[in-house]
Image: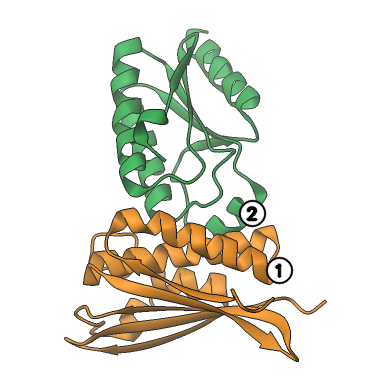
Chain colours: A orange, B green
């Protein structure tokens, strides 16, 4: 059952954003997220995948199901690129800040939609962003 | 989803466009141009964008829709976005997006009604 609960997809351009959304939608559904959380997760990855395209050109998305007491408990998604890095993470996390002429919603918005976000970045080396969302305990 | 699959339907003076379920950036950009050219060709007074099958509205999509609505307004038309799914409305708002001044309706029927009312008001 947990065999297929991880995967990865390469991001080589904007046309791959649709595949990223599709893969993530199927993954989040299979883990047991409801329709609203699936929409939140898919929208967050759409923003993060677009950032990869805009700033780094290419990258990779990896996802895996998170377990708790051997039951599905959440999803973790990582975006890794070898782009220019984020010069000022605090600034990038501010609503409305952008260096690409976009809306500046991507990073802060994705964090709000997912709940957990970690950013590792080094100028000239690249950026790794990890987001997590947990199934709501019932 | 190919951009060719987007159809523009004319209902009296109004254009009805159904946005495909998971459009890529290119399709959204093509849709914008298609809408504006159709506005000119059919001398339409308004535009209804049916997004009832759309499952993901991210910042690029929202920005392009808001932009399209502004462009249609420059051409003297009104735009109504119809049929946004509940989960999309929740997500778009939490993401921090707005559709600018674009008007919205629960479904296409109500959207067409809004545009007809707008037309009548102008005549009076």
Q: Residue at x 71, y 89 (%)?
A: A68
| Mark 2 Cα-neighbour bin, 10 Å: few <14, some 14–19, many ≥20 | some
Check whether the beta carbons of the residues at disc 1 and disc 2 lie within 8 A of each other: no
Query: Same chain for marks 1 and 2?
Result: no
Disc 1 is placed on an element classified as loop
Quadrant in which residue A129 is drawn: bottom left
Rounded to the nearest whole Å, what is the CA distance between mark 1 and mark 2? 16 Å
From this view, report whether residue A42 is shown above or below residue A60: above
- Judged left or right of residue B13, residue A69 is right
Task: Determine which residue is flagged by label 2.
Answer: B87
Residue B51 at x, y = what percent?
54, 38
Q: Residue at x 34, y 63 (%)?
A: A50
Quadrant in which residue A121 is drawn: bottom left
Residue B43 vs residue A4, the one in the foreground:
A4
Q: Which chain contains the residue that carries disc 2?
A: B
Of circles 1 and 2, the one toward us is 1
Residue A101 at x, y = what percent?
24, 60
Which image quarter is the C terminus of chain A in?
A: bottom right
- Can the viewer see residue A60 in this picture? yes
């Amino acid at each position: 059952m947990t065999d297929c609960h991880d995967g990865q997809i390469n991001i080589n351009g904007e046309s791959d954003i649709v595949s990223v959304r599709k893969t993530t939608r199927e993954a989040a559904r299979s883990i047991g997220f409801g329709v609203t959380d699936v929409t939140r997760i898919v929208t967050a990855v759409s923003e993060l995948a677009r950032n990869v395209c805009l700033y780094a050109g290419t990258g990779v998305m990896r996802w895996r199901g998170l377990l708790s007491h051997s039951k599905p408990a959440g999803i973790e998604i990582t975006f890794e690129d070898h782009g220019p890095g984020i010069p000022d993470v605090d600034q990038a996390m501010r609503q409305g800040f952008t260096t690409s002429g976009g809306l500046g919603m991507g990073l802060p918005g994705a964090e709000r939609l997912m709940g957990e976000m970690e950013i590792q970045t080094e100028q000239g080396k690249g950026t790794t962003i990890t987001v997590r969302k947990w199934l709501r305990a019932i | 989803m190919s951009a060719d699959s987007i159809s523009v339907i004319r209902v009296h003076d109004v254009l009805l466009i159904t946005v495909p379920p998971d459009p890529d950036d290119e399709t959204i950009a093509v849709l914008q141009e298609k809408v504006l050219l159709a506005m000119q060709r059919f001398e339409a007074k308004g535009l209804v964008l049916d997004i009832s099958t759309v499952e993901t509205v991210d910042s690029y999509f929202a920005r392009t829709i808001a932009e399209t609505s502004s462009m249609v307004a420059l051409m003297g038309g009104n735009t109504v976005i119809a049929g946004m799914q509940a989960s999309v409305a929740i997500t778009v708002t939490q993401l921090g997006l707005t559709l600018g001044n674009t008007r919205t309706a629960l479904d296409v029927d109500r959207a067409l009604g809004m545009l007809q009312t707008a037309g009548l008001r102008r005549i009076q």
